[in-house]
Amino acid sequence: MDWLWFVLVGVVCLLAGAALGFFIARKTMMNYLKKNPPINEQMLRVMMMQMGQNPSQKKINQMMKAMQKQQEKK
């Protein structure tokens, strides 16, 4: 009978730890994305204009694809 309670408490603690870990990881990831948002087309357009380049849609699409390929390599 004692081993049954031991197993039951172990399973409950395991589930509670998994749930707690999920919410902590989610909160950490949301804070990271708030501080470091992913680059979108509008940000690229502004960055290119600041560098003195004329941002055409073709250039922006090329840069977005290049960044996505770089992300896939990691």
Image (cartoon, rainbow, N blue to C red):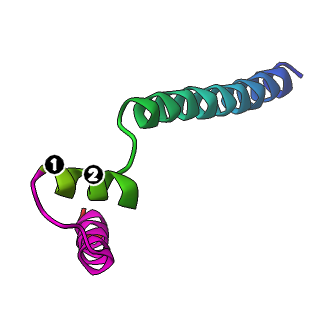
Q: Position of residue 44 (x, y in %)?
A: 28, 57
Location of mark 1 (residue): 50
Residue at the limit of the structure toward the right, as seen here: 1
| Residue 34: x %, y % from top left | 45, 32
29 is higher (above) or lower (below) than 45: above
User: What is the span of residues highlighted in magenta in the rendered image?
Assistant: 51-71
The residue lying at 33 percent from left, 76 percent from top is 57
Neighbor class of circle 2 (other Cα within 10 Å; few <14, some 14-19, many 20+) is few
Q: In screen coordinates, is 53 left or right of 70?
A: left
Q: Disc 2 on helix, strand or loop?
A: helix
Front-most of residues 55 and 71: 55
| Residue sitting nearer the eye, 20 or 55 | 55
In the drawing, what numbered circle is on residue 46?
Answer: 2
Q: Amino acid at mark 2?
A: Val
Q: Quadrant of the N terminus?
A: top right
Quarter containing the C terminus: bottom left
